[in-house]
C-alpha cells in the first residue's frame, strides 16, 4: 500500500487527487494538507467526500510528512515547493509536483516567465518532466517528477508526432487553447465569479502565458531544433476541459519529379498512429471526428485528431482532455503508478462521464 | 459474470448504465439495444466509450435477448415494455425496467396519468418497486423490478421517515423539485435546445406531472393512510442533479400538561437516523448543511437534510441526488446487485465528481 | 433633466442602474460612487460602458452629493444608508434606497433579522415601500423610497391578489423561490465562484432568510391579518432571474346549499385580472402558460400565472422576473419616474432579451 | 415610418430583429413571416413579446409582401431567397438578406461551398455586401443588401486594417473563432440539445466551414491580392457571442539601415485607429484589454484589440461581438438605417447587458 501525502488538498487539483486515489487499489492517503483549513474535517470543505473521508486537514510540514508517507503530491502555488524541498527530503520520499517549479530545465527561463526567484535550482536537473507518454522510462526511476501543466499536456501531445517526424515547419506553430474555469483554481477572485465567467469567452495571457516556455521546451526537444510558438489560452464557461486547436504549415520536400511535395493526410495520420497506437490514455480518433471535451470529462484520456487542409497547406491538430485529470491529478497518479511499479492505469480506468 | 442486455442503450439513462457497468466486477454487457442506431458502433454515438466499447447497436428483440443474457435493463419510453413483456420472457430472464410501466400498482391510476392503455396488467402484481432502501428484501427475490422514477426516488427518500413515524400531517405535504436537463432525455425537441434551457428556470407539469401518483403510492404506504401531495417539478440549466425541497406541517400531540406539543428538531432528526443510519447510499447530513446536487454528481448517493421551523410549525425536508445515477442507472445497478446476490455497492463506489 | 447620483455604482445593481439610466430620456448620471474604485474610470470596471461612460468613480460622500443631484440611488450593504442619512440630506435630495434599511416598518424586526442596529430609526416612518403596483400614490409623494428586495417583489406580486381577495388561507402560504447568481452580488467569495455554482442547485437561508419579514409585512397588510410564510430561496446556475413558486390552500366558504365551496380557477384568475389588468409591468399570462425567467430577462416585466389544483385544494402561484431589473434597478427607476412625474415606463420600455 | 416585413421571424435572428425594431423610432413591423407557425400568435412562440406584439405569424409570400412593406428582412435557410427573388420584387421593395445567398460575388464559389445551385445568379451583381463599416456608401444606394455572416463580420473587422495597410503577410492568416450556440439556430437537432452542448467545447467545420470564402473575398479585396485563410469555428456553451482570435506574421520591410524592420505595436495600433476611430459600433480597446463577449452582449458593438508579439513576429488580433446583433439582426437594422436615410445608430443605441 503506497502511503500518500497531499499538500494543497483543498484546491481543485488536490480535491481531484483525493477522488482518484480513493479508487486506487494500492494507495492510501495519510495526510490531507491544507494550510487554509487546518484541523477542519476535509469532508466539510468537500462535501462530496462526506462519509468517504473522515480525516481532518493538516499543515504543510514537508519534513514531518517525509517521515510518514512514500510519496508527496504538491498541488501548491508556484515557488512553494522550490522554497522548501531539499536533498534530505528527497532521500526519504518521492515527490510529484503539480506546480511549475521543476518543469523548466533552464532556471533563467523559469525566473523570467514566472517573475520569482527559484530557491532550489540545484534540484531541477534531477527532476523528470512527467509527461508519461514521452518520458515513461525516466519517470519510472525518478524521485522528483514535475507534473506537466494542463495546457502543455494537451498542446504537446497534440503537436508532438508531426514535429518529431519533421512533417511540419516548426516556425509556424500556432496553439489556440480553451480551458474550463477550474484551471483558474479555487481562490476567491472577482474575475472567476460565476457572473463574470458565465456567458462569456475571452483570451487572456496573450503572448505571455507562463505555459509557453514549458510547451516550447518539450516541442523543441521533439523537433531537434528551437521551436517558438504562439500560444493563446481562452477561458470557457464550463467547469472542466481543455481543447487545443493547433495550426502549422506542412513541410514540403522535393518530390521524385523535382517539384515540392507535401505530406498527405495518410502520412500525417501515420505519424500519430506511430506514437500513440499503444498508448492507453491517448485516443487518436477516427478520421473526421473532432475531439470534444465532453467525451473525456472525469477521465484520464486525451482525445486527439488531425486534419490536413490542402487549400492552405496547413494541418490543424486538435486535442481534448480533462484539465483536472490528465491535466493535473490523473497524470500525477499515472506518474505515481510508474514510480512505484503499479499498473499505469490503476485508479484511472473510469470511463468518461457524459453528460 | 452476469450477462446483461440493455434496451435503449443510447438514451442518457442507457449511456449511464453502460458507464457504470463497465466498472462492475461481475457484469458484462452483451447487447447494446438501440433501435435508432442499429448496426452502428456504440462508441460512435457515445464517443466517451471510444476504445472502451467495441460493440455495435442492435435491435430491441426481447425474446432473442432473453436467451442470451441474465438480466435485461429497459430504458425505454412508457408503454414499450408493457407491450412486449410476458410470462415466458420472465421465466428466462430477470428484468429491471427503468420506465414507469410497472411502478404503479393500480392499473387505472397508471392509465389515467399516462394516458395510455397498459398492455400487460397481469404482470404488475409481480413487479417489485425497486427503491432498495424501502423494499430491499422484496427486490432480492424479484424477477421484475420497477426501477423508480428520478423525482420519486428523491422525493420519497426525503419525506419517508417523517411520514412513517407520524411526525408530519400527511395532508400538508408540498414537494417542490428541481431537475437538471438530462432528465428530459435525448430526444431532439426545440424545448430542450441549449438556448431555450440555458439562463432559464421554469416550472412544468404543474399539478399533473406523471410522477405524482408514484410518489403518493409510496408515501401513502409509509403513512398508512392516503397521502395526496402537491408536486411541482422545475427545469434547471445544468446537466445532472435533482434537488427536492419539501414542506409539511408538524403534527401536534397533546402534551403531558395538556397543551399541544410539536416534534422537536431532535425528534425529527432521530427519525432520519433511524431509517438511514445504516444505508450506504443515503447520507443524512450534519445539522445546518443543505444538500447540493454538486456534491453527489456522478455517484449513487442521496444527500438528505431537514430543518424544523418553529415560526411556521413546518419542517423543510431536502434531498439531492444525481438523476441519472440514483435516479435511474445507478439504482438499476443497485437493484441488479440485490437480485443477483452481489454486494449492493458493487460498481457504485465511485466518489462524486466535483467540480 | 433629473440629475442622478449613484452610491455603489460598481455592484451588479449599480451597473444595471447605469445601463437603464443611459436609456432614460430625462436622466443624467452625475456621480458614479464606488468606494472600491475611486478615481478609476467607470468603463474600466464595466467594459460594456466603454465609450458610453467617460466618468471616473468617486467616493460615497452623501452630503456633498445632496448638493449636486436631484436623486440618490443607494445600492449599498445593509446598514450603510441608515448610518449616514439624516433629515438635512432628505431636505435637499430624494433618495431611492436599494438596500433593506427602510423596508421594514418595525425597527425591532429589522434589527432581529439583520443582526445590526438601525442608526436612523426616526426616518423609517417617512419611507415608502416602493413596490409601485401596490403603493403608487405614496411613492409619488415620497422623499425616501425603500426599493423592495428581489425575492419580496416577485413573491408579493405573485401572492397578493389571492390574499387581498381572501381566496386563500393565510396560514398555508409556502414560497419556494429560485434566483440567478447575480443576486449574490459582486463580492469575491469562494461560494460564488463559477465552479462552485455551476452545475449545481441548492437551498440556502432555510427558515431564516432576511427577505422573510419583508414579504410577511406586505402580505399581512394585504390580508388584513398577520401572515407567516415559509420562504426558501435557492441558487440557480444562471446570471439573472428569479422564479417564485408559491403554494396555498384555497379558502372554502359555505356554499348556497350548505356544503363547503372552494374558489374556482375562474374566480382565482379574476382576482389577478382585477389587480394587474392595467399594470404595464405585470403580465398575467394566458391559462396554462408557466412563467419562465428567460422571457423577462433584461426587462422590468414580472410574468405571473396561477393554477388551481382540485386534487389538493391548493393553488400554485408562479412569478418570474429579472432580479436586477424589476428586482432592483428597474424598479428603482420606476420609483424615480413616479417621484419626478415622469412617465412610469420611461427608460424601461425595452423588450426582454432572448435568448 | 418604414414598413417592415420579416421572413423567418421565429428563428433566433428573426426574434432579435423583432426585439430591435420594437425600439426603433421610425420602423413598424407589418408582417411576421413564419412558415412553421402560420396563424399562431407571435407572442405565443416568443413569450418575451407577450403584450408587446399582438400579430399572428403569416406565410412567406414575398410577392404579396412586396406590396405592403418598404423593406423585407429574410432570415431564412440558404437558397430560399435566391429561389424566389426576382427583378419585379426588387423594383417594389428593398431587401436585406440575412442568409448567404448574395454574399459571394462568384457564383461558382457559392455553389461549391454551399452545395446548392444558385437560382438567381443574375441578381448577385447588384447585391451590396452589408458590412457597413467597409461599404457604407454602397449600402446607402442599395436595393438588395447581403447581410454578412456572423463569423465573417467579426473576422473581417478584426483583421481588415492590417491587411489593408499591408502590415501583415496575407499568406499567414489563421482565424480561430468561438461562437455561442444561438448561431446554430432554433432547429430541433440532437447536437444542439442542452446536455450535448453544455460543459463542452469543440471545433467543427474544420477546413470547410461555409463562412471561409466570404471572409476570404472581403480580405482579398482589402489586401489587393488573393488571401487564403485557415478558419476554424468552435462551439462554446453560452447563448450569445462570437470571439475571434486571429494570427498573422508581421510583414518585414527593408529598414533604413538595410536590415529587415517589422511593424511596431504603435504602427499596428495606428492602423486600427485609422479605420475605426470614427466608427460608433467598432470599439478599439485600450492597450492590454482583451475583448470579451460579455461586454457586448445585446448590443451592436464589436470590441477589437491587437497585440504584437516580438518573440514570434506575429500579431494577435481579437474581436468580440454579439452574433445575433452585429452578427445578424443588429447589422441588418444598421443596413436598413443606411438604406432609408435614418441615423445609423437608430434602434441600436442600447448599452450592452451585463451580467
Image (cartoon, coloured by chain):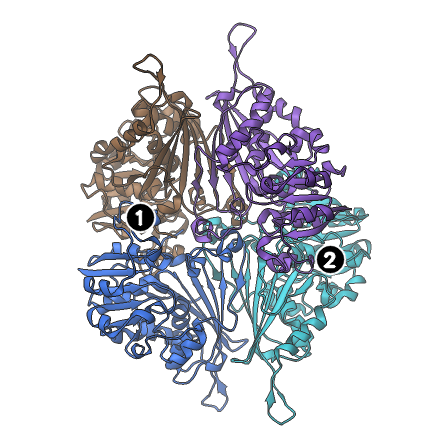
Chain colours: A blue, B brown, C purple, D cyan
Q: Position of residue C228 (x, y in %)?
A: 49, 25
Residue in the foreground of this view, choosing between C21 and B291: C21
Q: CA distance from mark 1 to mark 2?
A: 56 Å
Up-down relation of residue C198 to residue A63 (above or below): above
Up-down relation of residue C277 to residue D156 (above or below): above
Q: Is residue D69 left or right of residue A25?
A: right
Q: Is residue C119 left or right of residue B345?
A: right
Q: Position of residue A126 (x, y in %)?
A: 28, 78
Tell me the chain of label 1.
A
- Tag 2's secondary structure? helix
Q: Which residue is mark 2?
A: D334
Q: Position of residue A17 (x, y in %)?
A: 31, 58
Q: Position of residue B110 (x, y in %)?
A: 39, 27
Q: Is residue A241 visible?
A: no
Residue in the foreground of this view, choosing between A279 and C161: C161
- Residue at (63%, 22%) from the top-left corner? C270
Residue in the foreground of this view, choosing between C75 and D91: C75
Q: Quadrant of the N terminus of chain A?
A: bottom left
Q: Which residue is mark 1?
A: A43
Q: Which quadrant of the view contains residue D148? A: bottom right
Q: Is residue C227 left or right of residue A62?
A: right
Query: Around disc 2, counting alpha carbons within 10 Å, would you say few (fewer than 14), some (14 to 19), or many (20 or more)?
Result: many
Amino acid at each position: 500500500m503506497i502511503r500518500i501525502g497531499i499538500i494543497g488538498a483543498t484546491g481543485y487539483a488536490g480535491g481531484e487527487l483525493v477522488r482518484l486515489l480513493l479508487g486506487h487499489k494500492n494507495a492510501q492517503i495519510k495526510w490531507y494538507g491544507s494550510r487554509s483549513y487546518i484541523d477542519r474535517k476535509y469532508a466539510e470543505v468537500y462535501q462530496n467526500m462526506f462519509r468517504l473521508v473522515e480525516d481532518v486537514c493538516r499543515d504543510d510540514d514537508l519534513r514531518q510528512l517525509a517521515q510518514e508517507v512514500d510519496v508527496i503530491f504538491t498541488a501548491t502555488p508556484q515557488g512553494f515547493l522550490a522554497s522548501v524541498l531539499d536533498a534530505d527530503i528527497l532521500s526519504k520520499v518521492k515527490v510529484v509536483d503539480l506546480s511549475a517549479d521543476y518543469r523548466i530545465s533552464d532556471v533563467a527561463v523559469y525566473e523570467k516567465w514566472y517573475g520569482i526567484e527559484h530557491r532550489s535550482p540545484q534540484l531541477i536537473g534531477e527532476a523528470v518532466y512527467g509527461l508519461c507518454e514521452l518520458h515513461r522510462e525516466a519517470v519510472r526511476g525518478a524521485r522528483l517528477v514535475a507534473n506537466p501543466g494542463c495546457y502543455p499536456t494537451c498542446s504537446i501531445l497534440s503537436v508532438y508526432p508531426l514535429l518529431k517526424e519533421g512533417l511540419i515547419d516548426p516556425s509556424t506553430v500556432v496553439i489556440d487553447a480553451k480551458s474550463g474555469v477550474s484551471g483558474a483554481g479555487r481562490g476567491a477572485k472577482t474575475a472567476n465569479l460565476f457572473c463574470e465567467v458565465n456567458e462569456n469567452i475571452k483570451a487572456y495571457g496573450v503572448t505571455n502565458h507562463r505555459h509557453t516556455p514549458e510547451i516550447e521546451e518539450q516541442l523543441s526537444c521533439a523537433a531537434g531544433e528551437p521551436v517558438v510558438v504562439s500560444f493563446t489560452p481562452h477561458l470557457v464557461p464550463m467547469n472542466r476541459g481543455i481543447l487545443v486547436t493547433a495550426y502549422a504549415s506542412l513541410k514540403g520536400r522535393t518530390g521524385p519529379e523535382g517539384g515540392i511535395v507535401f505530406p498527405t493526410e495518410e502520412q500525417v495520420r501515420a505519424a500519430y498512429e506511430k506514437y500513440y497506437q499503444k498508448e492507453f490514455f491517448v485516443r487518436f480518433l477516427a478520421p473526421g471526428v473532432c475531439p470534444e471535451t465532453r467525451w473525456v470529462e472525469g477521465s484520464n484520456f486525451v482525445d486527439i485528431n488531425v486534419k490536413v487542409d490542402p487549400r492552405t497547406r496547413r494541418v490543424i491538430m486538435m486535442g481534448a482532455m480533462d484539465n483536472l485529470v490528465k491535466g493535473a491529478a490523473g497524470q500525477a497518479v499515472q506518474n505515481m503508478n510508474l514510480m512505484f511499479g503499479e499498473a499505469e492505469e490503476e485508479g484511472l480506468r473510469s470511463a468518461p462521464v457524459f453528460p
